[in-house]
Image (cartoon, grey):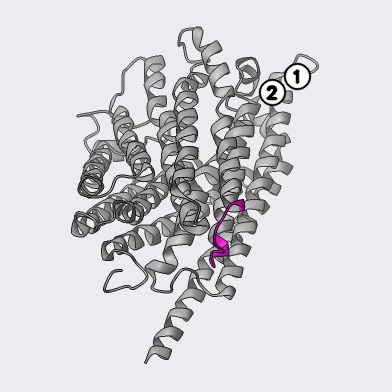
Amino acid sequence: MSQGNPHLKFASQAVAKPYFVFALILFVGQIVFGLIMGLQYVVGDFLFPLIPFNVARMVHTNLLIVWLLFGFMGAAYYLIPEEADRELHSPKLAILLFWVFAIAGVLTILGYLLVPYAGLAKMTGNELLPTMGREFLEQPTITKMGIVVVALGFLYNIGMTMLKGRKTVVSVVMMTGLVGLAVFFLFSFYNPENLARDKYYWWWVVHLWVEGVWELIMGSMLAFVLIKITGVDREVVEKWLYVIIAMALITGIIGTGHHYFWIGAPGVWLWLGSIFSALEPLPFFAMVLFAFNMVNRRRREHPNKAASLWALGTTVTAFLGAGVWGFIHTLAPVNYYTHGSQLTAAHGHLAFYGAYAMIVMTMISYAMPRLRGIGEAPDARAQRMEIWGFWLMTVSMLLITLLLTAAGVVQVWLQRLPADGVALPFMGTVDQLQLFFWLRLYAGIGFFAGLICYLFSFRQRGRLVAANLATAR
């Protein structure tokens, strides 16, 4: 056990805490801008021209990516030392990289909000190496370079920790996913003038992150938490993990083709994309079986019930969002009509929440009590608050998904499959969807309330720490 914190196996695991805390701060920001966008759907001039819709959307999606990256890095700094059975190679480097990444992220978001995008591109020297102006990759070139530097330092730190310590399947899978994350991000620097070629390689970042290497990171984090909270033999968990990552890589890599349907890529992708993307729900379904099987075979009753709930919940919600809702509109003959509709937004919201937001919160739920010196679990009151947060966020996200799905169906019907042969224009169609957007806004407020409950559960834990310190004195 570490000397400073008796609840940590290694003192250097404490560097995960600022990553987790900052991730949650950015998560709050993401949801606030999501609510701003929700209002702008129904009150068109809300906060205009202070925060136009395109800027709010850019901030919303960028905060999503960055807070998840902070969560993944925090998870690695906690998980890798314990799996390697040694201290982190350089805790000081981990803290330095935290501040570099945090400052770069904050400055980039402020740039989006305070400077017109064209001015930001000129200010940051985008003309020297043009990389800006693409969805989800709007970051200035200098920010992208900073991300590469942070990623290299991060991979060096955890890589050296692994090389000098024990190698496990969990740590190797996580390292493979993190290396893939860094490698595929390099394609964000490739910005060919040909639009079809640009979109072709753009998906090498966007798709091969979220439907490829991120699934390896998710699987390793889930396996780690399940080993800890169930006490099931590591060998059993590792066999499941091998099967899941094999399916994830095979279906995810070739399944990239379902993004190539309508961008000028060869027609063979109509078949390859349809077939292999239709198989992509399989690894997520395997995760559901894996998690529930491990919990049913558990050898101990872990006191942190909230962490167990998050672990089980992430597999079910990821299967629904990434699996079922992805399949709904992935086949080429269906996608021809649904492409870019509100069905895409429905899939994206539930998939990102279920697969990645929830696995980060699973890891935070398990690790934070130890990082804060509480022990294996917070008190019952804090756990109840956290569980309220879980259900409010999850049910609200399911409602958002169902409402966006209904909006997408009506959108396709009015705009792309009109009964009388006369399609409504886009804005006319959106006007017919206002009820769905109002209800989606209310569901978003419910989600924000759940996030507040989740954050308040940490305040309860802080009281427990103070009480323990007072008792010890």
Query: In the displayed structure, does residue 154 sit left or right of residue 422?
Result: left
Image height of 93 relative to 163, above or below: below
Q: Amino acid at mark 1?
A: Pro
Quarter that holds the N terminus: bottom left
Q: Quadrant of the C terminus?
A: bottom left
**Residue 279 placed where, x, y %?**
57, 24
- Position above or below: 387 against 3: above
Choose between 299 and 55: the one closer to the eye. 299
First to last magenta residue range: 296-306
Q: Is residue 154 left or right of residue 341?
A: left
Q: Residue at x 59, y 57 (%)?
A: 309
Q: Are marks 2 and 1 in contact (CB under 8 Å)?
A: yes
Q: CA distance from mark 2 to mark 1?
A: 6 Å
Where disc 2 sits, the SS reads helix
Residue 299 among those drawn in magenta: yes
- Residue marked by disc 1: 418
* Residue position for label 2: 415
